[in-house]
Image (cartoon, rainbow, N blue to C red):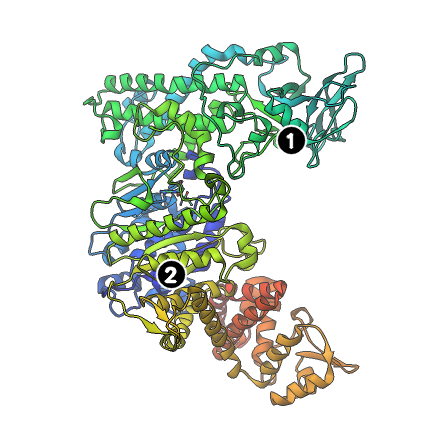
Amino acid sequence: MTYRKKLIEVALPLEAINVASAREKSIRHGHPSTLHLWWARRPLAACRAVIFTSLVDDPDDPEAPAEFVAACRALPKGPNATASDTPRQRLFDFIERLVTWEATTDEEILEQARHLIRLCTDGNPPPLLDPFAGGGSIPLEAQRLGLEAHASDLNPVAVLINKAMIEIPSRFADLHPVNPRDRAGTAQGGSWKGVAGLVADVRYYGEWMLDRARERIGHLYPDCEGEPVIAWLWARTVKCPNPACDAQMPLVRSFDLSTKAGKRAWVEPSVDPRTRQVSFEVRLATRGKGPEGTVDRQGATCLVCHTPVPFEHVRAEGRAGRMGAQLMAIATEGQSGRSYYAPTPKHERAARVPIPDGAPNTDLPAQALGFRVQAYGMTKHRDLFTQRQLTALTTFSDLVADAREQAHADAVAAGLPDDGVPLRQGGSDALAYAEAVSVYLAMILDKQADLGNNLNRWEPVAQCPRQLFARQAIPMVWDFAEGNPLGGSSGSWQVLVDNVTRGMGASSFNFRRDKSGYATQGDATKLTVDGPTSISTDPPYYDNIGYADLSDFFYVWMRRSLHGIYPDIFATMLVPKTPELVATPFRFEGDTAAAEYHFEQGLRDAFGQMRQIIPPEYPLSVYYAFKQQEIVAEAGAASTGWETMLRGVIDAGFSIVGTWPMRTEMGSRMVGQGTNALASSIVLVCRPRPEEAPSASRAQFVRELTIELPRALKELQSGSIAPVDLAQAAIGPGMAVYSQYRQVLEANGERLSVRTALQLINQQLDEYLASVEGELDADSRFAVAWFEQFGLKDAVFGEADVLARAKNTAVDALAARGLLQAGAGRVRLLGWHELDEGWDPRTAEGPSVWMAVHQLVSRLNSHGEEGAALLLARMSADLAADARQLAYRLYSICERKGWAEQARDYNGLVAAWGGAQVQAAALRDRALRQGRLDF
Ligand SMILES: C[S@@+](CC[C@H](N)C(=O)[O-])C[C@H]1O[C@@H](n2cnc3c(N)ncnc32)[C@H](O)[C@@H]1O
């Protein structure tokens, strides 16, 4: 099968992609993820880069379309092309701009990207399918890049998120709002580009719901001292097991209300010795803090008799239905910020309402990943809410239906045609539009659930309730904050309407959608697709996240509000569990092996399906997410999960042609000088392997590896790959050699395993990096060998002397040239901070590559990129190139030895290289123009 290589199969500007991905994590406002929570979303920057580079060719490839190469040549020159002006480097500079957060809203750059894609796809880009679409980052970016996007997921909540992200916006683009308030604005000539009209309607009907909710349940939320309440703070209680005490003991992790400097507030408990009842007061002070909580990791303590109480008792009480809650304090929004008040009977009473009719009555799973609450007797979804919270949520949920009816009537009144075709059948008239509005209203309701349940902690710094899903878990919470949904503060309906509509209105979401999007529910192991489609996907990873169990929390509310709109998607009472690809032993009666088999076999089936439908022209890209423990323990090495994933893809009939480590966490040193954080996922790039692919012997595989890998490594390094990423990125081209064959056979006829292949690739990488040593000057050869043995520790002179002679140099001379310190019979290499600051490569006697590397590290660490550039400008091109190569080698030595600090230095140097080189070139230019020889 012949095809043109796509850029992602050859080289990527990885550092820029990783930096943009990490930066994106800190963007809270205006990010499409504000629409609805989903766990472990992929950064848009990474998705955009992967899709784009899977569609455009490598412009340095002689086979690349001439028009595309010309278009790349015409792209503006940035740091990459300044260093070496080739079409690929110009394209790298473009990609570095395309992946930034700013580009999500830059139509000019996006249109340029779409144009480049068209040039490489005969003007007809393929549709893109993500069969594990989740929170929808990949389909959204596909649509942004001008592709028809298809999102599929087993999970109805994910399907709805994707509908809201890609399907509904393209169907109702450029419509005027239908609500009477904004229609008046339209009459005055308002502009309603993209989803602006839809956003206005979601806001209007969201507020319309709030007005009605106030009428229906406003009496349940009384003011306190004339001030609107932000939250009621509750402590769970159980009866003390000490028969002599018998008190209702409050379970409190922290009594702090405000830890703000100068404005402290806390709850002070006191015990009535006669009744043995606990009551609470509020203390305000400029300093100090609340008393110790009554629950810690070990167990609880009774506030009344001080008896330690084990969790077994608390659990037993909970399971027997005897866990209660006592009001501890009331937080209000006063004249000058937060005020706190002691509980009153009126406020206790207001919360005491019956469970409303129609509240979800579904069971929590008996056990699930990250769920802790069942052990305390919370066994139904409704148990995660107070009765007042259930009342509010059912009221808002009913109002979603009312708002839909109202929007329908308003849409008809506004003159929208009304053919009666619903949203699920592709409708786009009044009825479908009203249904679409209600989808977003149901998403606001989900936000309300996340911030309106009895597992919301009070946050004493920001002084507001904190959402439940800070992590992918449902942990037990002892003292909780019940926010006021009808108020105007964090967790209130109004604020959530504001947040969601701000996210929808942001230009990162409201971009020009040239092509339609489709979101459907489906099992990835049984794909049905019309016609060929490109695929990029991010499958679940073992037992990392229990998506189905977690999302039931939202599903029960979403189903209540939207069942009539999507009866098929919401057919089941809870999110479908059995086909979910997750290795959770709870679903297999505790059998870990059975759970893993289910996951691995399912993934193999899914890849098998993808192999059937993917066209030969485009590579498949698959994100492989590490578990956090694995990152620390095994990244880069052959972890079992990683190996299984590679084997699964290969067995499904793919060749692996690229492996790109992606980092989404911001390393502490990232901003200044490149990052050294490890990858949190790897993108696998795969091509369908021809059915007729031959077998090969181990010897043949090794022979090809020795030829192919060094070539590929040079390409990777030309893409400024950071040393920290090189080992993982090298797996791609190595595996490309291995997996082009149907199988590689050992001399005894057995199959050469993926693990062995990975080991052989690693060996080759090591040899490649070590080969730099042969080319080095004598001083550097000595220093590298010594460093590998002793690091920066001292050792006896005799050993140094023997080594120096072997390398054709002398210890005295090395000391004189400032590489090491020798005295009292001991020798030690100097660290970068001990080097002569006045060292100049132009005047130094035979400047060694070792010295060049460490002087650069020194300048970079103490004076930043500019300092390194000044020194680089004085180096010959050969010395600089050798120094960069040696930094990779030194990094690999440090990594192997576990010398993290030095590893960071070498990684930082290579990461900063591109920027420093551009500055160095500018310095040389300027000096030349001014006729000066100094910088
Ligand atoms: C890692 S997540 C995808 C995250 C997504 N890329 C994002 O940015 O949010 C994996 C998804 O696979 C889905 N999933 C699990 N088993 C599935 C199956 N058998 N078929 C389809 N989807 C499945 C889960 O519901 C989850 O949404």
Q: Residues within 10 Å of mark 1 (few under 14, many from 20)?
A: some
Circles 2, 1 touching at the beta carbon (< 8 Å)? no
Q: Is residue 889 placed above or below 374 in the rendered structure?
A: below
Give me the residue at 64% from left, 31% from top: 460
**Quarter of the figure with residue 396:** top left
Q: Amino acid at mark 1?
A: Pro
Residue 263, image x and y in percent?
A: 70, 28
Front residue of 179 and 624: 624
Residue 467, image x and y in percent?
A: 54, 31
Element type at mark 2 = helix
Q: In which quadrant is the N terminus drawn?
A: bottom left
Question: Quick one: label 2 or label 1, which is nearer the N terminus?
Answer: 2
Q: Residues within 10 Å of mark 2 (few under 14, many from 20)?
A: many
Q: Is residue 872 placed above or below 493 in the rendered structure?
A: below
Element type at mark 1 = loop
**Quarter of the figure with residue 742:** bottom left
On residue 107, the disc is none
On residue 460, the disc is 1
Q: Specify whether residue 194 is in view.
A: no
Q: How many marks?
A: 2
Q: Specify whether residue 49 is in view.
A: yes
Residue 262, image x and y in percent?
A: 72, 31
Image-quarter location of ligand 1: top left
Q: Amino acid at mark 2?
A: Phe
Front residue of 600 and 228: 600
Closer to us: mark 2 or mark 1?
A: 1
Q: Is residue 743 left or right of residue 18?
A: left
On residue 92, the disc is 2
